[in-house]
Structure formats: structure tokens, C-alpha cells
Image (spheres, rainbow, N blue to C red):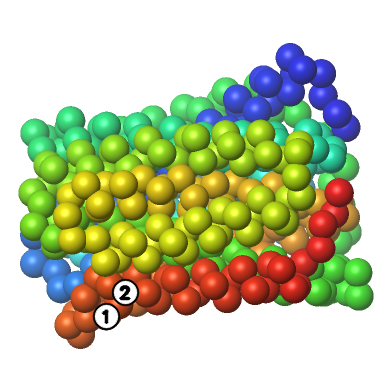
Amino acid sequence: MQKSTKKGRKLLLVIGTAWLFDAMDVALLSFIMPLIKTEWGLSPAQIGYVSSVTSLGMVFGSIICGYMADKFGRKNVMIVTLMIFSIGNLLLALTTDVNQFMIVRFFTGIGLGGELPVAATMLADNFKGKTQAKMLIMADSFWAIGWILASVISTLITPLYGWRATVIVTFLVMLYAFVMRRHLPENYEKKEKTSLREQFAGIFNNQHMGKTLALSFLWFVVMFSYYGMFLWLPSVLVMRGNTIFHSFGYTLLMSLAQLPGYYLAAWLMGKISHKVILVFYLLGTIVSAFVFGIANSVPILLASGAFLSFFNLGAWGALIAFTPSHFSQEFRGMGVGFSQSIGRIGATLGPYLIGMLIGMGFGIPVVFGMFVVALILGVIVLIFGTSETY
């Protein structure tokens, strides 16, 4: 159902803020990593485990909540997921060792992983065609705002009050659940009799199977590269000789480039093929990741990091607009949730492999070369494995 301009903006604001808070959580984790490494004396491999365990929880959250949204309705599931990861962040501030930290992050990841595909599905239910694509990208652009806010909070608060104070701030997200309860529509008829097995069969039937496999691989590549590169970004900057304060500031500057990346993608949606837009952003990510990996000066590091933010987050926005339209409405929640859950496996492996490779003595150029290869494979699958839906 197409919404009026006023109602559409209101829905975009309400759902987009969910991306904002999710991004704050993920970004804050990236800023916490160098600090807990020092506080608990963690090795690079252990840091890889810490950054990956949230994504592992997201794998389960994406599938379970995508199914629940199709069966019980989008609105209630979104509120529950918000509460899960908000309470998780409050508990995180109370942890005293890395094992407690990882357990809390796993359950926090279930809420994080469940919310975004449900939010995307809700927008897709309410808009059609080019408007749907633009709305999905604009909602995803709130991720950049959340990342920027987290960068500001970390830069200003963490050096003075420590990482626990910055984590507690995200607990306020739980209050947003009450705002959502008043303003989110529920236009989708619940399907009480549809089983999880039937939902899986639906996204792997003759109509959907090829799309499901291709989109799942694309989400794997995009999340593998994004979480691998950006969760380690402040740590990589510290490893290259920058102070904690400077690395946080540089990350903030790089993060500012995310917003124009999203907005350009939204503007292009009404003018050229969605597939062409996604290819453009993935190719830009490949070049930026390669240059960032071999950068040997602060100006080149900042410039390539900014372009990496621009293209990688733009690719994410284009893909999130590209995905829901490939599935019929009755299987859309499961289709989006499943493909993103495969992406979460990539999000789990990316940070872990960086920690493992660095622990084995490999340098940053080799690490980022791994992401370049994965992204090239993603472009090939996109070109030959998907088709334009409108």
C-alpha cells in the first residue's frame, strides 16, 4: 500500500530510527575493542572472537524473527527485538571479564539481527516500485547517522569516563519501543497456520530458489567485508601508530562519508537500473579497500577510508532495496531474514579472520586483499545470478 507523503515520511522516520540505534550498537563495539584488549589483555584472535559473537547471534535472530514477523506481524516483533538488544547493552556494562562480555553480546546479537530484516520488510509492505527502493535506502541511511553519533559519543565520553559509560547510553534505545507501539502500522495479515518448514519451502520453491541463493551470497559478501573492515577500523588505525584519541577522530571523519553514499544511491534509484547501482557501489568498495590496505600516509588513509565508507555503506543500502522485491509478500519476511542470516555468517567470519590473520603475522594489505577478492566474487554473482525486478 502506497502511503501519502506525510504518512510516508513519518513511517520512514520511525522505522529509520531503528537502523540508527542498531548502528550505534555496532559502532560502539568497534570503539570498545581497543579498550577491552588493553583492559583484559586480549590477543588479536580473542578480539576476533569478541567482534564475531554478536554476528553469530544475528544469524539466529534474522531467521527466527523473519519467520515470526510473517506469522505474528511485523510491529510486535520489532518492539521485542529492540528491547532484547537494549537490555543487552545495559547488562554489557556490568560484565567483568571477556567470557561474560561474549555471552551478553551473543544475546544482544539476536535482537540486532532480528530487527533489521523485519524493519525492511515492513517498509516493503507499505511501498511499491521506485518509491519502495528509495524508502528502503533512506531508512538504511539512518545507519550512517547512528555510526556518526557513536563516533561522537566515543570520542567525547570514552577517553574521560571509559567504555562502560558509552555502552550505557545505548540502553536508552528501549524507550523507543514505546514510540514504535504508538506509531507503527500493522498492515499485514498474520498467518497463524504457516509453519517454519512451509516458510523455508516457500523461499526455496521454483519461483524463489535462484533469487534466494544469489541474494544470500551477496549479503554474505557485503556483511563479510563491512563487519570485517569497520569493526576493526579503530584497532587498525591504532596498529598503524595512531593514538586511541586520533583513531577515534579519524574514524569519525571517515564515517561522515557514509551519508552522501546513501543519498546518491537513493537519488540514482529513480534513474538507472538497481543492479547497475549495486555494481557501481561494489566496484567502488573494491578500489577503496585495496587503497586503504596499502595506504602508507595519514592523508591517503583518511581519503581511502572515506571512500570506503561512501561505497560500502551505499552498497548495503542498494542491496537492502534490491532484496525484498524478489519475494512475494507471504514469504518476504522469511526471504529477507534468511538471506541476511547468511550474510550474518559472513559478518561473523570477517572480524574473526582478521584477528586470526593478524595473530599469524599477516599485515593489513593481506587482510584487506581478502576482502577485495570476496567483493569481486560478489560482483560476478550479482551480474550473472540476479535480474532486475522493476
Q: Which residue is mark 2?
A: 367
User: Where does residue 113 sit, x and y in percent of width and height?
Assistant: 54, 55
User: Where does residue 99 sit, x and y in percent of width and height?
Assistant: 24, 67
| 106 or 364, nearer to the observer | 364
- The answer to whether one can see residue 74 in this image is no
User: Where does residue 152 sit, x and y in percent of width and height?
Assistant: 27, 32
User: Where does residue 360 sit, x and y in percent of width and height?
Assistant: 20, 85
Query: Outermost residue toward the bottom?
Result: 360
Residue at horizontal 8%, vertical 67%?
41
Q: Are marks 2 and 1 in contact (CB under 8 Å)?
A: yes
Residue at horizontal 84%, vertical 38%?
128
Q: Quadrant for residue 150, please give it.
A: top left
| Quarter in which the N terminus is drawn | top right
**Taking 18 as reference, is 284 above or below it?**
below
In the figure, is residue 318 to the left or right of 162? right
Q: Nearer the viewer, mark 2 or mark 1?
A: 2
Which label number is shown at residue 357? 1
Residue at horizontal 42%, vertical 71%?
371
- For disc 1, the neighbor class at 10 Å (few under 14, some 14 to 19, many from 20) is some
